[in-house]
Amino acid sequence: MRDTTKQKNSGTVYLIHFRKRYKHAGHYLGFTENLDKRITDHLCGMGARLMEVVTEANIDWKVSRTWRGDRNLERRLKRWHNAALLCPMCAGEEALNRGNFAQKVQRFVKHTR
Ligand SMILES: [Zn+2]
């Protein structure tokens, strides 16, 4: 028996908050099917060019938020072009009301931009 509904949400979209901006970048938004491994890669400065330069610049960073979802969700979230609004470390709890595309149960939450 195959559960096809599962494959749609087989990964994690994650938001990384940089303690200090790197040029204009304050965040990195990515997708992975294995968050632990991906984070380990980033800690070594691997996996994404931005994370590589941020690590080289000795900027501390933290995963500030994760979503269960796929690459479509990653694209939708990237279209915001303002990750700070989605980041609880920047925008506080308000951020958690934003970008909940994958969670239809929360459709009553106002989508303020
Ligand atoms: Zn942030």
Image (cartoon, rainbow, N blue to C red):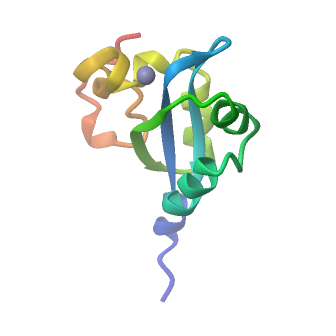
Looking at the image, is 83 positioned above or below residue 54? above
Q: Residue at x 48, y 89 (%)?
A: 1
Q: Is residue 10 visible?
A: no
Which residue occupies 49% across, 34% down? 61
Whether residue 89 is visible here, answered yes or no, is: yes
Residue 63 location (% of width, % of height)? 43, 40
Tell which of 90 and 86 is nearer to you: 90
Quarter of the view holding residue 67: top left
Q: Give the percent coordinates (x, y) of residue 109.
A: 25, 25
Q: Quadrant of the C terminus?
A: top left
Which of the 4 image quadrants contains residue 90?
Answer: top left
* Image location of residue 87, percent across then percent down: 39, 25
Q: Quadrant of ligand 1?
A: top left
Where is residue 84? Give x, y as percent: 45, 17
Q: Residue at x 34, y 42 (%)?
A: 103
> As displayed, is residue 12 above or below residue 6?
above
Judging depth in this view, the residue of 46 and 16 nearest the camera is 46
Left or right of 104 on screen, residue 28: right
Residue 70 position (above or below residue 14): below
Total labels: the figure holds 0
Of residues 59 and 4, the one nearer the viewer is: 59
